Amino acid sequence: MVLQLIRKPHSRLHIGSGRERLEGWINVDSQALPGVDVVADVTKGLQFSNVEAIFAEHFIEHLPLALAVEFLNEAWRVLARGAWMRLSTPNLDWVWATHYRLEADPETKRAAALQINRAFHGWRHQFLWNREMLGAALEACGFAGVRWCRYGESELSLFRGIERHETYGDTPQLPHVIIVEAQKGKPRLERLAEFQELIRREFLIHLSD
């Protein structure tokens, strides 16, 4: 059953589906939860090809940065030519702007210290993205036409109304969640190498075991 699904052409992949099954999609998760079609650790690669679309909601922030870039590169590889991916992830800009004020009173700042660290480390988060960082990663991995979307909205019918995660009160100018769509473009091996060296030099080498 799993092998037949994996080989099916023009599949739509829902990565990190959890219990939020999407009909008409192959729902992939690392746990054998109700509604999951394929149980797989996608950080070890995607056993698919010629994929029509990829959707991953609140998934990429759970990957360490290096693995997140590898996932984007692997997603690019398995997508069909000109196919699209849609991602959503917490917005670092929103966390920074809403969780901490230097002029706050001591009690508020103590609470904010817990809240902002919870945003970074809670719910097994590994890395918080902003638009600039995520856009650069996508483009380095060969994606083109990067565009930022609002919750449930898309120029592509297959992505409209697809989000299931809870939302908070925010504004179009400062959403609490980044939602991005990007189309498979031409490979950019030199740009990818430069981006990987950037994150290695500025972040990865500073992590302790």
Image (spheres, rainbow, N blue to C red):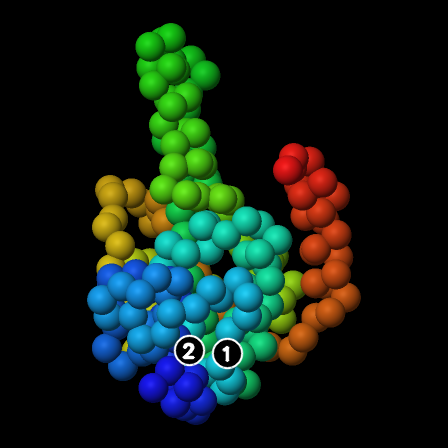
Q: Quadrant of the C terminus?
A: top right
Q: Is residue 118 above or below residue 144?
A: above
What residue is pinned by disc 2?
53
- Which amino acid type is marked by label 1? Gln
Q: Residue at x 65, y 63 (%)?
A: 140
Whichever of callouts 2 and 1 sits on the residue coming sooner in the sequence is 1
The answer to which of 145 and 53 lies nearer the viewer is: 53
Q: Residue at x 65, y 35 (%)?
A: 208
The answer to which of 34 and 142 lies nearer the viewer is: 34
> What x and y, as percent, mark residue 126?
49, 44
Whether residue 130 is visible, yes or no, is no
- Which amino acid type is marked by label 2? Ala
Q: Is residue 108 left or right of residue 51?
A: left
Q: Residue furthest top?
A: 106
Q: Residue at x 51, y 44 (%)?
A: 127
Q: Is residue 200 left or right of residue 36?
A: right
Cα distance in 3D space between marks 2 and 1: 14 Å
> What x and y, as percent, mark residue 29?
37, 65
Q: Is residue 200 above or below residue 35?
A: above
Which element carries disc 2, helix, strand or loop? strand
Q: What is the crowding at mark 2: few (fewer than 14 residues within 10 Å), some, or many (at least 20)?
A: many
Whether residue 122 is visible, yes or no, is yes
The answer to which of 57 and 143 lies nearer the viewer is: 57
Q: Quadrant of residue 115?
A: top left
Q: Is residue 148 left or right of residue 73?
A: left
Q: Quadrant of residue 3?
A: bottom left
Q: Residue at x 75, y 52 (%)?
A: 197
What residue is pinned by disc 1?
47
**Whether label 2 touches label 1, CB < 8 Å:** no
> What x and y, as percent, mark residue 184?
55, 76
